[in-house]
């Protein structure tokens, strides 16, 4: 019985060449880069949705507070709410709420804070690749009293309060 050697080089089988390995690594790298880009896009989209959801919750809290004051016969207290921190109307503040500051804003991104000097509720955008605003990387809101129709010569009936944007912004 003859002895046969079956080494990989003699049977025609071989592993990856260096060139094939480089091509595979390059393809995997390109796919990973595309995946990370999509991931950042969706993270920014989620940040926008979370910010808008918080604004909606605050607006609901404002309506509930107005209804409470009306039911208690304290309608004259409603205009005073425009000078208060809207976050104080929430039963539970968002985890990214940094607190109240008098003019000096915190430097962290992705947070809410209340500027008590200017009476502004501010959200600092964290992932703002698709965000633009004249205020920089901020979305600013102000509680404003909505005047109603005139009753008598000097008094004005209040129609309510609204949380309105101070500066226009575009996000996506």
Image: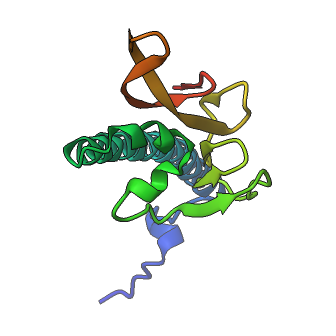
Near-viewer residue (170 or 120): 120
Q: What count of labels does the image hold? A: 0
Give residue 100's position: percent from left, percent from top: 64, 60
Q: Quadrant of residue 42?
A: top left
Which residue is at 46% across, 61% downward? 12
Q: Residue furthest right?
A: 104
Give residue 37's position: percent from left, percent from top: 55, 42
Q: Quadrant of the N terminus?
A: bottom left
Whether residue 127 can be seen here: no
Q: Residue furthest front?
A: 153
Give residue 33's position: percent from left, percent from top: 57, 46
Near-viewer residue (100 or 75): 75
Whether residue 159 can be seen here: yes
Which residue is at 47% across, 66% downward? 95
Near-viewer residue (5 or 75): 75
Which residue is at 58% across, 51% downward? 29
Q: How is the image coloured?
A: rainbow
Image height of 4 relative to 53, above or below: below
Give residue 168's position: percent from left, percent from top: 60, 21
Near-viewer residue (25 or 166): 166
Image height of 28 relative to 60, above or below: below
Q: Quadrant of residue 106?
A: bottom right
Which residue is at 56% across, 35% downward? 142
| Left or right of residue 160, residue 136 in this image | right
| Left or right of residue 129, residue 80 in this image | left
């Amino acid at each position: 019985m003859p002895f046969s050697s079956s080494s990989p080089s003699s049977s025609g089988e071989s592993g990856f060449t260096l060139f094939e390995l480089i091509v595979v690594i390059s393809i995997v790298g390109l796919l990973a880069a595309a995946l990370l880009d999509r991931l950042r896009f969706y993270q920014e989209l989620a940040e926008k949705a979370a910010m808008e959801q918080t604004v909606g919750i605050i607006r609901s809290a404002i309506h509930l507070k107005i209804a409470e004051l009306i039911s208690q016969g304290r309608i004259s207290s409603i205009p005073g709410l425009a000078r208060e921190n809207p976050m104080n109307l929430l039963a539970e503040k968002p985890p990214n709420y940094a607190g109240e500051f008098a003019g000096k804003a915190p430097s962290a991104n992705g947070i809410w804070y209340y500027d008590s000097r200017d009476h502004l509720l501010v959200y600092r955008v964290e992932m703002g690749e698709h965000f633009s605003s004249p205020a920089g990387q901020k979305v600013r809101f102000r509680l404003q009293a909505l005047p109603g129709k005139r009753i008598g010569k000097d008094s004005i009936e209040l129609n309510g309060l609204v949380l309105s944007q101070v500066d226009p912004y575009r996000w996506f």
